[in-house]
Image: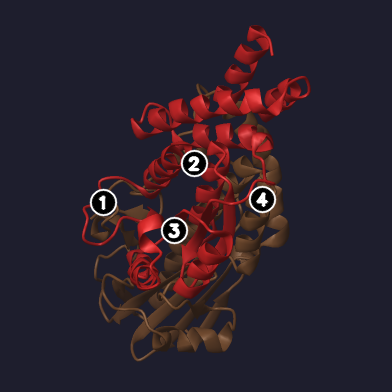
Chain colours: A brown, B red
């Protein structure tokens, strides 16, 4: 595996199927707003496909992989445009769909990394998350920023663009029986609607 | 405005049907509709907080009610994401809800310093500052606004609220959507009084 590996949008298709997003929003066909949400869905998907380019960057350094997943600044811009236009249903769908795409990218990147490491007889050790396993600083994203200039940290150490994810994977010479997926059981947000979603694990 | 049209409008708002609301608006006076909208938002917010309906239905109601918002009124509240918060959704949803309640709101967008917020308070003579944050670290900067507002003597006349993430010291007994909805209602109730 190279020092820097880029995975482009061809690895991260944006899905047509609305069922998971609607499930996260608890938008069932019993609700009065369901027809409106359904009507807006396809245009929201098309807009995201047209404007957004999902990208993952994996940097290998000192026996560890730093993984940056992002939908880019266009995702934030698209969501804000919808809110400013008063098209709140479209904005909510875009926001939730963007999160779904991010989580699927997470799962896909972990799988791709595992496959590449297997070729070297290496394995994923542990997954380390910012704010849980380490305090995120500019140093952690310096190597990513060198490859992807738009990757940054806000003054409150939040990732920018906001539809981004960063985590680290340690490397091991033996199989560690770890999924490498995000573990929701370590998060304090007990009522998060994404808890235990596909691509995430609880314990 | 006749009773049948009132009922039709109320049903359209509760369904969150923007098209039906627009059709009712064609034939109605704004002030009567504003009074109806207030009760619809209250009913829907309570239903969401009691988990009787999901948040998406409240979003649909707010979209349907958006044409009723009078943007020409002088602002009484500002709503901005705190310093370092770059997530558009939470702050925009808070503005959406405040508009839904009819609270004249200055939208301050993302990544606001304490000085920027207090400058807006003094310039527009605002009564409410509604901050949003997506993470606990972002939420911490609300204390700076509190301290600086007190130092400027603004604190007694200013209601300062945080929507979005629960502060670190508090158990996360509710999620960010619920906190946003309850904060919007709190502002609306204080404004209506």
Give the class, few, some or many, for how many residues have Cα within 10 Å of label 4's Cα (few <14, many ≥20): some
Q: Are marks 2 and 3 on the same chain?
A: no
Of marks 2 and 4, which one's residue comes earlier in the chain? 2
Return the chain for callout 2: A
Residue topped by disc 1: B172
Label 2, label 3: how many angstroms apart (C-alpha)?
27 Å
> On the image, which quarter does residue A37 sit in?
top right
User: Which marked residue is nearer to the observer: mark 2 or mark 1?
Assistant: 1
Q: Residue at x 52, y 44 (%)?
A: B98
Q: Front-most of B148 and A175?
A: B148
User: Which marked residue is nearer to the observer: mark 4 or mark 3?
Assistant: 3
Residue topped by disc 2: A20
Q: Front-most of B128 and B175?
A: B128
Give the class, few, some or many, for how many residues have Cα within 10 Å of label 2's Cα (few <14, many ≥20): some
Q: Is residue B71 visible?
A: yes
Return the chain for callout 4: A
Label 1's element?
A: loop
Q: Residue at x 70, y 22 (%)?
A: B20
The disc placed on residue B132 is: 3
Q: Is residue A95 above or below residue B19?
A: below
Q: Is residue A15 above or below residue B134?
A: above
């Amino acid at each position: 595996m190279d020092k820097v590996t880029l995975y482009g949008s061809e690895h991260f298709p944006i899905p047509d199927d609305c069922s998971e997003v609607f499930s996260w929003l608890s938008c069932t066909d019993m609700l009065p707003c369901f027809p409106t949400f359904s009507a807006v869905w396809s245009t929201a998907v098309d807009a995201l496909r047209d404007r957004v380019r999902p990208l993952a960057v994996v940097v290998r350094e000192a026996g560890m992989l730093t993984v940056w997943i992002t939908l880019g600044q266009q995702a934030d811009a698209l969501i804000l445009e919808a809110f400013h236009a008063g098209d709140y249903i479209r904005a909510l769908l875009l926001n939730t769909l963007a999160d779904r795409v991010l989580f699927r990218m997470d799962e896909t990147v972990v799988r791709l990394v595992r496959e590449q490491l297997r070729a070297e007889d290496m394995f994923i050790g542990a997954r380390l998350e910012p704010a849980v396993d380490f305090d995120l600083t500019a140093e952690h994203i310096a190597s990513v920023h060198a490859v992807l200039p738009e990757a940054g940290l806000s003054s409150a150490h939040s990732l920018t663009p906001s539809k981004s994810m960063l985590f680290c994977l340690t490397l091991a010479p033996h199989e560690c029986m770890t999924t490498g997926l995000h573990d929701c059981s370590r998060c304090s947000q007990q009522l998060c609607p994404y808890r235990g979603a596909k691509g995430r694990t609880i314990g | 405005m006749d009773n049948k049209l009132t009922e039709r409008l109320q049903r359209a708002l509760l369904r969150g049907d923007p098209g039906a609301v627009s059709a009712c608006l064609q034939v109605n006076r704004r002030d009567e509709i504003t009074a109806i909208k207030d009760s619809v938002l209250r009913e829907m917010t309570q239903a969401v907080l009691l988990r009787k309906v999901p948040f998406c239905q409240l979003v649909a109601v707010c979209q349907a009610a958006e044409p009723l918002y009078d943007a020409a009124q002088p602002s009484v509240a500002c709503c901005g994401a705190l310093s370092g918060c770059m997530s558009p959704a939470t702050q925009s949803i808070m503005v959406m809800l405040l508009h839904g309640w009819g609270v004249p709101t200055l939208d301050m967008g993302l990544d606001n310093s304490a000085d920027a917020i207090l400058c807006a308070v003094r310039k527009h003579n605002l009564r409410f500052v509604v901050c949003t944050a997506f993470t606990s670290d972002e939420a911490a900067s609300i204390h700076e606004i509190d301290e600086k507002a007190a130092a400027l003597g603004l604190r007694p006349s200013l209601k300062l609220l945080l929507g979005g993430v629960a502060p670190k010291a508090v158990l996360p007994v509710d999620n960010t959507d619920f906190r946003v909805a309850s904060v919007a209602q709190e502002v609306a109730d204080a404004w209506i009084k």
